[in-house]
Each structure stands twice: as C-alpha cells, then as structure tokens.
Image (spheres, rainbow, N blue to C red):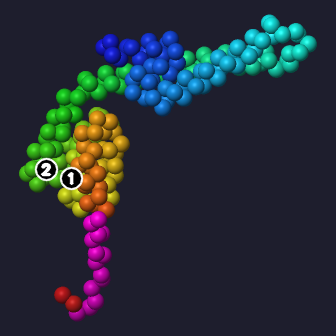
Amino acid sequence: MRIRQIIPICLSAILPGAGHIAAGRPTRGILIFFLFGLALDGWLFSQAQTILPAESIPPSVEVIGYASIGLGLLLWAFAILDTAGMALRRRRLEGKADVANAHVRDALIAYLRDDHPTALNSLHAAQRINDQDPDIYFYLGVVHAGLGHARKARRAFTRCIRYDHDGKWDNEAHERLQALESTPPPPKLQPREEGEL
C-alpha cells in the first residue's frame, strides 16, 4: 500500500473519525468522531464515582462506564476496519484502472462508429470494474440519450454528477440533464384501425 492509503488507517487508530476525514469522507468521519466523543464523555462521567461520596452515586453509573468503553472500542475497531477497506478498494481499482480505461476507449470508438450496442457493452464492462467513475456514467448517459432512452440517460448523468468530486463533468452533465428534461416524451403509437395503411 502507498503512504497516502496508510495515513488514514493510522489516523483512525489514533483518533476514530480522523482517518475518514483525511480520506475524503468527512460526514462519516464527523459522525464517528462525535459518537466516540460521547463514549469518552460517558466513561469520564462514570469515573466521577472515585471523586464523589459513594452514597450520592446511583448504581447505573458503573453500567454507563462499561457501555461507554464498549461503544468506544466498537467505534475504534469500525473506524480502523472501514478505512482499511476503503484503502484496499482504492488499491484494487488502481490495479484495474488500465482495463477499465481500455473498455471506455473501446466504447468511445464504437460510439463514433455508431455501434451503440458495443459501446453499451464496453461501458457496462468498465462499470463492473469501477462503479463510481463519473466518466463511465457520463458516456453511458450520452449513449443512452443517443438511443432515445431518456430515463436511463437521466440516471447516468445524475450518477455522473454524484461521483464527480473534481467537477470535470459538472457543467456538461447538468446541461445534458436540462436538455433531456426539456425534450418532450415521444408520442405513443395509436393502434391502427382496420383499413388504414
């Protein structure tokens, strides 16, 4: 593993939640950090029994202490295992990036040749390798829009925007989504009456 993948794991071992924030998952990291803080606060509260007189401490304080330790340990283990899982997923994707890029390249060539089924097959193969690549979803949206599959194109452009953290496709995907929204649905075919050609 590379150093940039190991740093979040080490940060999670030191302070649960910090590794998620460093790895680009701030919402999850802040939630883990907040819950770990609550567990730590519960443990500190349970330690009040050493300072206060024994008759003023309810019996549930000891239970709060054990529950806080258990919650803290669970959050600590989850933070380490989750950041390790994210690092392993990134490593796996980096190893297969060349294969996914080859599928995308084949899809673009097929699309330019107006071979839409081959383009879709190649893009779906790339999607199986990396299901969070905004490039794949953008090209899927373009191919589906070209085939007249407006619903699938909308879904692909929406996912492209969701996974595009760098903003590479942001404007283009939004413009294509607006174009799909402004396009009226195709008219439904009416059944022919007898005698009509």
Please provide percent x and percent y for residue 168: 24, 39
Residue located farthest toward the right when viewing the structure as drawn:
55
Mark 2 surroundings: few (<14), some (14-19) or many (≥20) residues within 10 A: some
Cβ atoms at labels 2 and 1 below 8 Å apart: yes
Which residues lie in the magenta part? 182-195
Up-down relation of residue 183 to residue 118 (above or below): below
Residue 136 visible to an observer of this rendering: no
Up-down relation of residue 179 to residue 75 (above or below): below
Q: Secondary structure at mark 2?
A: helix
Determine the image quadrant of residue 89: top left
User: What is the chief secondary structure element of the magenta stretch?
Assistant: loop
First in sequence, mark 2 or 1: give its number: 2
Please provide percent x and percent y for residue 80: 48, 17
Residue at 65%, 20% (x, y): give it. 39
Residue at 74%, 16% (x, y): give it. 45
Q: Secondary structure at mark 1?
A: helix
Residue located farthest toward the front when viewing the structure as drawn:
52
Please provide percent x and percent y for residue 110: 12, 47
Determine the image quadrant of residue 102: top left
Residue 143 numbered mark, or none: 1
Where, quadrant-wise, is the N terminus in this rendering? top left
Which amino acid, by three-letter code, is at mark 1?
Answer: Val
Mark 1 surroundings: few (<14), some (14-19) or many (≥20) residues within 10 A: many
Q: CA distance from mark 2 to mark 1?
A: 7 Å
The magenta stretch spans residue 38: no
- What residue sits right under mark 2 in the picture? 111
Which amino acid, by three-letter code, is at mark 2?
Answer: Tyr
Please provide percent x and percent y for residue 166: 29, 35
Please tell me which residue lies in front, 36 or 52: 52
In-image side of 192 versus 108 (left or right): right
The magenta stretch spans residue 193: yes
Residue at 25%, 55% (x, y): give it. 176
